[in-house]
């Protein structure tokens, strides 16, 4: 029931966001044709008004009636409430995309999506534990086969490169990130914890790229030179919120990024092959050059020798 109501709320927000001012009849007509209205129910005025009140209460989004052209016109009067709340915006975007895809089910074989193998079965209990400030009993094994077992305090979750992660307080002086798809078992305990009042998840990851926080690392002003189509790619989808374009010509474009150069960020730099060059700081430039040199060494032996090693 709760899930159904949430879908209806998101549908109403999305409908008004995309269409602007609408009459009740127009909204009701849209609802009758919606892919989530699988039982063909009507949207009564009473239900509509209840939904508007619930949306204001739960999302802080105001749907207000304005008299115009002899009609009652409904619209969202504070759209900034959507943009300022990253969770609401993400949920709304996901819902809007989901309804679009369901509306095109007849061409499902022509719509190719990325699969997220991220242990989603653990996401619900983790979020419940965060909401209730309850510790979780965790059994975990990383890709090196190193196991971790114990009670931890979940602080936040983060989605990065098709994997869900949970950041936990494992000791008073130590936080650790766990990938949900490497969790072997998880139980929410009855033991509560006091969520640190000075901890802000967004601030914790603000100066990094990805999920490696680089705690104690130094924030660097990094300058990269980009070639070919990469400048346009980075303009349309910045690598980090601190990214700024500092110079451009017909051959290349330079960007500055201010963050801690952690493992995830270095991986991202290498992802762009010969279309990206680190100009500064020198220490990072040399580190990238050393990695490239080691990669080259993998190809120094003849192909025949490598193939023989597989036999």
Image (cartoon, grey):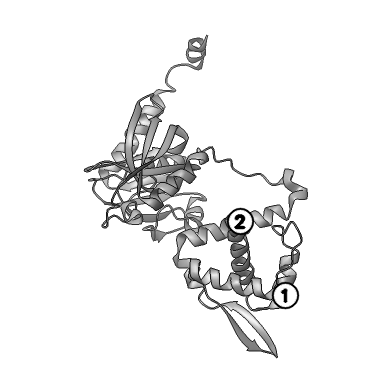
Cα distance in 3D space between marks 1 and 2? 25 Å
Label 2 secondary element: loop
**Residue 268: x, y in percent?**
42, 43
Q: Residue at x 68, y 57 (%)?
A: 100
Q: Which mark is residue 1?
A: 2
Q: Quadrant of the N terminus?
A: bottom right
Q: Is residue 173 above or below residue 14?
A: above
Q: How busy is the neighbourhood of tag 2: few (under 14 within 10 Å), some, or many (20 plus)?
A: few
**Residue 284: x, y in percent?**
29, 42
Number of numbered discs visible in the structure rendering: 2
In which image quadrant can residue 114 be found? top right
Q: Is residue 80 above or below residue 139?
A: below
Label 1 secondary element: helix
Q: How busy is the neighbourhood of tag 1: few (under 14 within 10 Å), some, or many (20 plus)?
A: few
Q: Nearer the viewer, residue 184 or 260?
A: 184
Q: Nearer the viewer, residue 280 or 93?
A: 93
Q: Nearer the viewer, residue 77 or 40?
A: 40
Q: Residue at x 35, y 50 (%)?
A: 133
Question: Is residue 158 shown to the viewer in this render?
Answer: no
Q: Is residue 301 left or right of residue 135?
A: right
The residue singled out by tag 1 in the image is 26
**Residue 286: x, y in percent?**
29, 38
Circle 1 or circle 2, nearest the eye: 2
Q: Residue at x 34, y 49 (%)?
A: 208
Q: Which mark is residue 235?
A: none
Question: Is residue 231 shown to the viewer in this render?
Answer: yes
Most distant residue in the bottom direction: 70
Q: Is residue 268 above or below residue 102?
A: above
Closer to the chain start, of discs 1 and 2, is 2
Q: Is residue 169 left or right of residue 62?
A: left
Q: Residue at x 39, y 51 (%)?
A: 132
**Residue 265: x, y in percent?**
37, 44
């Amino acid at each position: 029931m709760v899930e159904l109501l949430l879908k209806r709320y998101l549908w109403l927000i999305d409908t008004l966001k995309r269409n602007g001012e609408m009459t009740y009849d127009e909204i009701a007509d849209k609802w009758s044709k919606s892919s989530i209205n699988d039982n063909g129910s009507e949207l009564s005025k009473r239900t509509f008004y209840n939904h508007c009140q619930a949306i204001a209460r739960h999302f802080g989004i105001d749907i207000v009636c304005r008299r115009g052209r002899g009609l009652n016109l409904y619209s969202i009067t504070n759209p900034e409430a959507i943009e300022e709340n990253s969770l609401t915006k993400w949920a709304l975007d996901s819902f809007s995309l989901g309804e679009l895809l369901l509306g095109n089910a007849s061409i499902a074989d022509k719509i190719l999506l990325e699969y997220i193998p991220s242990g989603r079965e653990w996401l619900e209990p983790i979020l419940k534990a965060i909401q209730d400030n309850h510790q979780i009993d965790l059994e975990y094994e990383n890709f090196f086969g190193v196991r971790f077992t114990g009670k931890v305090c979940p602080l936040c979750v983060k989605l990065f490169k098709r994997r869900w992660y949970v950041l936990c307080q494992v000791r008073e002086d130590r936080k650790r990130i766990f990938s949900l798809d490497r969790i072997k078992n998880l139980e929410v305990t009855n033991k509560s914890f006091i969520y640190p009042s000075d901890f802000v998840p967004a601030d914790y990851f603000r100066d990094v790229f990805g999920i490696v926080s680089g705690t104690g690392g130094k924030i660097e002003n990094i300058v990269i030179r980009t070639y070919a189509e990469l400048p346009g790619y980075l303009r349309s989808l910045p690598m980090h919120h601190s990214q700024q374009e500092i110079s451009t010509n017909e051959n290349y474009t330079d960007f500055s990024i201010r963050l801690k150069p952690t493992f995830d960020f270095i991986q991202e730099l290498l992802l762009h092959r010969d279309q990206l060059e680190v100009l500064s700081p020198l220490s990072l430039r040399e580190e990238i050059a050393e990695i490239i040199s080691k990669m080259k060494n993998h190809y120094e032996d003849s192909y025949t020798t490598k193939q023989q090693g597989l036999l």
